[in-house]
Each structure stands twice: as C-alpha cells, then as structure tokens.
Image (cartoon, coloured by chain):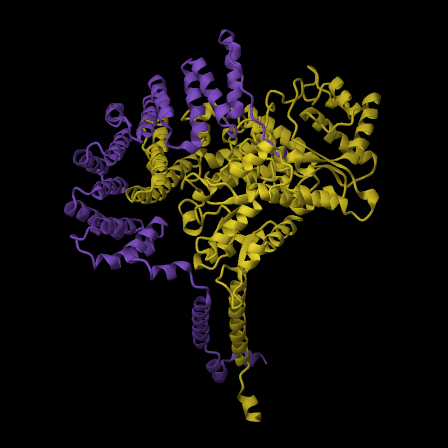
Chain colours: A purple, B yellow
Amino acid sequence: MTSKLTTPNPRIHRTMNPHKLIRCALILSVLTLLWTTGCAPESESSSTEATQAPLETGISELRAFNFNQAHAILLEHAQHISPENSDWPLATYSLALATWHQAPSTQQGIDDAKVLFHTLVEKAPQHNLAASALLDLGRIAEFSQADDAAAQAQAYYKRVQDKFPGTEMAVRASLLEAQSLARSFDKQQVKQAIQLLEKLTKEQAGSQWIGTIEQYIAHLYAFYLDELEPAITHYSAAKEFGFPRSSDTDLSLWQLGLWQQEVKQDLAAAETFTELVEEHPRSVYGSVARKRIIEIAKQHPEANITIPELAEVRLGR
Amino acid sequence: MKRFFKNFSLNWIAVALLLGAFIFSAVRFYLITDENTSAEADAAGKRVIRIAHWQLEPGFRESMQWAIDTYNARPEVQAANIEIAQLALPSKFYNQFIYVHMISGTAPDIAVKRDTATIKGNALSKFFTPLGSYVEQPNPYNAPEYQVPNLPNELSQFLANAPWRDTYFDGMQSAYDPSLSDYYTIPISSWGGYRIFYNLEILQAVKSFALAAATANDTWIQPLWRSPQQTEGFIPQAAGRAWLENDQVPQTLGQFMLYCQAVKQYAEAAQQPYLTPISASSYGLDQIGNIYGEQFLSRNWKSLSLDLGSSLNTMEFIAGYERGIWDFDSPEFLEFFKLLKLFTSYYPNGFLGLDREQARRRFVLGQAAVYYAGGWDASSIYKGVNSRDKIEDRFPIEVAPSPIAAPGERWDDWIDERVTEADAKGGVPFAINKRSPNFDWALDFLQYISSHRINEAFNQRSEWLPVIVGAKPPATMQAFIPIVQGFPKSFILNMQRYDAPASIRNAYGHSMKLYLTGDIEAAEFKARMAEVLNNPKIGTRRAWLKAKQDAVDNTRANDRTLSVERLNVELGSESAGQRERALFYIGLTQGEGAHVERWWHELYPEEEYPSY
C-alpha cells in the first residue's frame, strides 16, 4: 500500500498531468468569463456610443472622469482631424487631458500630454484652450522633481498673464504663480505674491474670482506672514464677494471670528459669530460661536449685544 | 465495459466535478446577475427596477416593502409595466457586490451609497448620476393632492412649492458632495445620535436599594459622596440623595456614576451574578466610557491648531505631541484613563470577547441596567424586550442622552458639554446607478419615498427618524432628535483617526485594550506609546511623511477634477465655475502638501522635511 502511494505510477502520472488540468481549468475559466460577460446586460453607454460623434463621446467620457475610455476614443478621433478644423483645439486639448490623467499615471503619458499641450499652444496660440494648456503645463512642471520646477511653472503662468491679460485664465495663472512664490516660505516672495494678487483685485473688480483672490490673500497674511489685521480686511472682503467654498461658509465665519478676537476686535467678532449662528443653523460651530458671543457680551455690557438663539432640530408638526 | 472500468481513471470524476461546478456557478452568476441588477424590459415588457441596501435591522425591510407595494400599485406605474423590487444585502459583502457590479455595468438601478476607498472623490461621478438639477425643483409627490389631509396651511404650501432639497430637515446636506459640488444621493431616514437605554425596572429597584444604603450610611456608599475632603467622590451627598428619592433616570454624570456603583452592589446583594451596570462589547461604540474621551481630549484644540480656525488636522495633534503640548500623562489623559478604568469595572467580565449582538441581548434579557446605542438599534431593542415570552420579563425603557457633570460633581471642569449633533444628517442615502436604463422611474420612486406623507409613514413603520420637514417621528425615536448644543468633533484629539499612520493607530488601540483589561497601567501605556511615537521609522516623523504623501495624492485627484471642471467652464457650464473655484482654493492652500510643509518650516526651520 505504502509503495503504491510513494512509487510514481506512469499511468496515473500521465492522466493526472497537473499542467493539463490547469490548462483545462484555465480554458474553462476563460470560456465562462466570456460567456457571462457576453450574457451581462448591455450597458447604456455602448449603445449611445454608436450614435454620438466620437469627439462628443470622448468629451462626454472625459466629463464623467473616465479618462482611459476618453483617451481611447479621442486618440482614434485625432487621426482624422486636421489643425484647420475648428474642432481641432478642443479635440487636441481633450486628448491631452485624457492622456495626462489616464490611469495608471506614467511618465510616458505625462510626456505625451506635454507634447499635445505644446502643439496646441503653438498651432492655436490665441485660443482660450491654449491658455488652459499653459496652465496645465505649469502644473505638470510643479509636479516634476526638477530643481527649477517652480521657476519653470512660474514662466508658464507668466506667459498666460502676458498673452491673455484681463481674462479669467490670467486670474488662474496669477493665483498659481502666487502660490508657487509663497511655497518658498521666503517672506519677501510671500509679499511679492500678495502684491501680485492685490493688483489683481483692482484689475478684476467684477470677476467671479474676487472672493477666491481675497480669501487667498487673507490666508497668506495670516499663515505665511502671521499678520492677522490685514488678513481680516481681506477675509471680510472675501465674505462680501462670496467665499469660494460656499458650502464651508460657516467654517470661514468661525475662522474670521476667531481672528477678530485674537486682535481684540471683539465687537466685530460678535457680529461674525452672530451671522454664523443665525445664517447657518446646521453648523457644528453654532454652539461654540454662541458661547463666545455670551463671553463678549459680558465683557462689553455697553454694546448691548443680543444673544442669538440656536435653532433646534425640529421634526413633526 | 470491464476494460473501460479497468482503464478508467478516478481523476476524470474530479475533472467532471470541476466542469460541473464551473457550469453551475456560471449559470448561477448569470441568473443572479440578471435577477438582481438593472436590466431592460423582460419578454413580457415588464421593467423591474432594483433597489439595493444593507439595512437588515428589524422593521426596515418591511417598511421598504410597504413603500414599494404602494408605489407599484399606483395606476401610472402599473400602466407603464414597472415594478420596483427590493434587494437587501448583508453589510459584510454589500460593498463588494455593489462595486463589482458598478464596474461591470450590471449594478441595481438604485443603491445605497456607502463611503469606501473605491468610491470617493471623482469616482463617485463615474458610478452615480448627479441629481443637482432635480433637487432644485419641488418634489411632485409633495403636491397638495398627495399630502396628509389637514396639514397646517403654511407647511402644506411650503412642501408643495419648496425645492425638493429644502424639504429635508438638513437641507439635504448629506447628499451633497463638496468635492464635486453636486447632489448624488437621496436620503430617506435618520437616526440621530447615540443615547443611553435604561431598564426602568432595574432603575427603581436599585434606587430603592441605594436610598436605604444612603439612609443607613452603608460603607459602600460613603466613598461616592464628593466633598473637599473626598475629591474622588462623584456627587455631593445632598444632591445624590435627592436624586435617589425621585424616579428619574440619571440627569448628571455624578448621578450616573452613583447609579452604576449602586447596580454593582445591588447585584451582589440580590445574588444576581449576571446583572451588570452597563452592557458593552468589543464593538467599541457601545462602550460609553469612550465618549467621555471626547470631552477630555478636546480641551487643547486652540493650542494644537497651527492654522487658527481651520478644521484640526491629524498632523496638528501629532505635532502637538512633538511640541510638548500634550503627553499621555497630561491631566486630560490621566483623568480620562481614570474614568475609563471606572467604566470598565461596570462592563460585563470579558466584554472584549463579546460582540455587539451579545451586548444588546444582555440588555434585552434584563441582565444590564444600561445600554448605550444609536437610533438604528432602538427598534431592535424595543421589539426584543416587548416580544419576550413571559410578560413579567418585559420591562419599560427610557432613553436619554449621555449625562454631563453638574457643578460640584467630579470632572465638572472637564465634562461640561457634549459633542454637538447640529450636523446630524439624513441617512440611508440612495443613489441612482449612472448606467441604469430606468433613470426616470428610479428618480420617481425616490421622489415618492422622500415625499412628506410617504416618508412619515415609512419611518413610523421602520421606527427610524424621518428626514422631511414636518414629518412626525415615531414616539420611540423622540429621544434621538439631534441635540445642537456642544462642540464640534473636529476639536477632539483623536489618535485613531483614519489618516494617522497605521503604526500609531494600532499602538494606541492595542495599548488601550491592554489598559482596559487591566494588563497595563497608565505609566506603561505612556511608555509603549512613547516607544512608537519617538521611533523615527514609525512614529511622528513617519506621520509627517504620510501627511505630505496623502496631500500630494489628494492634489493629483484634485487636479484631475479641476482639469475637467475648467473644460466644463470652457464648454459653457455655469455651475462648473463655482465647483472649479472651490477646488482651486483647496489646491492653493493645501496643494502638494503646502500646509504641512509650512508647518514643518515653522516648527523646524533648520531641518529638511522628512523623506523616505
């Protein structure tokens, strides 16, 4: 018995060839997979693809963050469109974005995207998407490990400011340049960044970006220069124009109120906290803000501060 | 034939079994997929719209089925040959099921969105349909003809005309994804906060017992009275006695501690070895002692903050340790440890070996005076108690918030407020599969179940909190209505936050278990944590590295979304502009870890940022 188990039997050995069994199992697996995949309900996107133009389909995939699908579609489409075609800038830019962001991210993909962005800038230099491409090239430069990454990025941002003055692309470029300067943590460069942005607030008085610019200036003053008073001025301006992260307005008001208290602007802080309690009844900062209003009211009885009530959660009728 | 059998290898049986198993599982996979996922109309022209969730608590499925049945019976639904069908899955494999099918394009039409690493950030928009444009419109099922009769006129008008979003008690905040600046889900229930369940029969018996002990000045009760000479006591004698004389559940922390100690003595005197003051388990969230850590460990929020007024970041807590702002022998930790030790003595022996279900059952069986649980457990607890075989085994329950210390009680300097529940939001967030061929009907059903009348009736049946303004909550859930007073969670120094390095989280969790079981003392706890935190490879320096790497990864994701939003702006989308500016601002302030680099530069100006 023992010998039967331990001595190799040529016949058994032949029939139990593990390679054959594994091959057989693999074939079955693949067949099963193909069959079940084929049986799965057809997705809606495949049916719509056939009816949409490739550029529209590619952009639609891009807008749904399906970068790999977008890349495949737009790459195929790019071979059939010449720079003379009015859709070419959009097609090239979309392909560049898809190439840059497709997963997994590779250096080759980034290099290919850079070529596409450069081609767009070269062949359609006045197009708004060329400005966008320069911003993207700036971002790619910032991500690179090069020693002069910041200088390279800043050069791209300056090109946008020079070639597209007064546009929203130039606003984005100025903000990115300011960020790049601030990240040196050198106080002079931070001040340079603030000057750049303060100039921008004058040039872009009616822009939707004003709230963003003002809040970022406040951020730079408060956390890079430790100067809360000018920070409060710009933060208050951002509040007037609308904070860029409107869903976090309560947090922004909480921050503004704390800064005001830090520099002894207690009454202004009480106003800010009151706005937080009254306008944002679902805020987690409401209760702590109200406690601060009560403290301020005790310290400044002459101000006759009205203590706002917290809105309770009400269900039922 | 004989020869055939002689030459026949048994291995062929194995091959045949293998083949059979493959065919069986393939057929089963197809059938289940076909049955449970979104699909076009069947041969009879009927479209079945699947709605998947993982709420297996008693009452929820039945209530959902009620809503489905009433919807399916609607004439226009029948005329369209539509049928909604429920798919309730265990939570353990809900994620795998949904996301595998999402990726393969075969997921149910409607599914509860669950936060996972697979589906966060812009991945959400890959799988689910944004609903922003729909939630801005009134919910058609809130029109007067669908409303509960005789609603107050103001409420009736509001429901009929307000945007769907505004009919939610939380303004549909939980449905909003700030990173994508759009609404992706339709919540249908809420459960409020955690509360304490009291067995009132035990309460009355124990209070009588303790009052007698107080009158007789028994030795066990004397150390519980707090006085200038006895600072380890919990409550001033007069206040404690006054509470024992009334029939209220504990309203303050001092009364609660007195009660727990009294239950222990009562169990001993009444020879009820299985009766414990508090039922708890390894689940953790039912260990009421843990929640008091929130109060002790939130006191330093301002000195820990490196960007005053921003939400506290994990790195700021950890940098606080490096800066010497706190340590494990700081007063807040020492007092927290003392309180935890006491609470542990009120839990059942070996509670870390019990699971959540066992802890709940102990309370239902009358073997624990107190149980700490969320609103989603309320229905199970009430049903469990009320369905006990012997009527005499059933007992009345009262639900109350966790008590805070009254002036003069122990820890009154520390535990004077709770964490706010002001941001309590709608739960069970249903999202519509982006690839569903039945989007309009899926949306219609979600409008139906989140309409005032149906949402009220649905939650009355499931015994959860409704999410629509003016909808009546079930009587059993009144105690779970969120309490807005308190401080935000972001103030709490939490060593186990998901973004802390695993080495620190694990060391804290492991050491805490050993402390709770009495295997180590506070000094040993501190030594163990110091060993990890000061280790350059796994400690605070590692945390700096991780914080930067996480920020860099987030920047990549943020940039991908930003690129697309900028393209959307160029293509004329008005709403994309607001989203782009919100994302842009995050990039400016936190991009590439600018904030953590700045903190490092401020704290260690002479040192290079840690690197691998």
Determine which quarter of the picture holds residue A23: bottom left
Residue B430 appears in the rendering: yes
Extreme front residue here? Answer: B145
Q: Position of residue A26 (x, y in %)?
A: 44, 71
Choose between B225 and B324: the one closer to the eye: B225
Q: Is residue A77 above or below residue B258?
A: below
Q: Position of residue A176 (x, y in %)?
A: 27, 34
Determine which quarter of the picture holds residue A128: top left
Horizontal side of B27 relative to B178 (left or right) equals right
Determine which quarter of the picture holds residue B557: top left
Q: Is residue A212 above or below residue A16?
A: above
Choose between A131 and B200: the one closer to the eye: A131
Horizontal side of B417 relative to A219 (left or right) equals right
Count up the numbered dots. 0
Q: Position of residue B517 (x, y in %)?
A: 64, 38
Residue B610 appears in the rendering: no
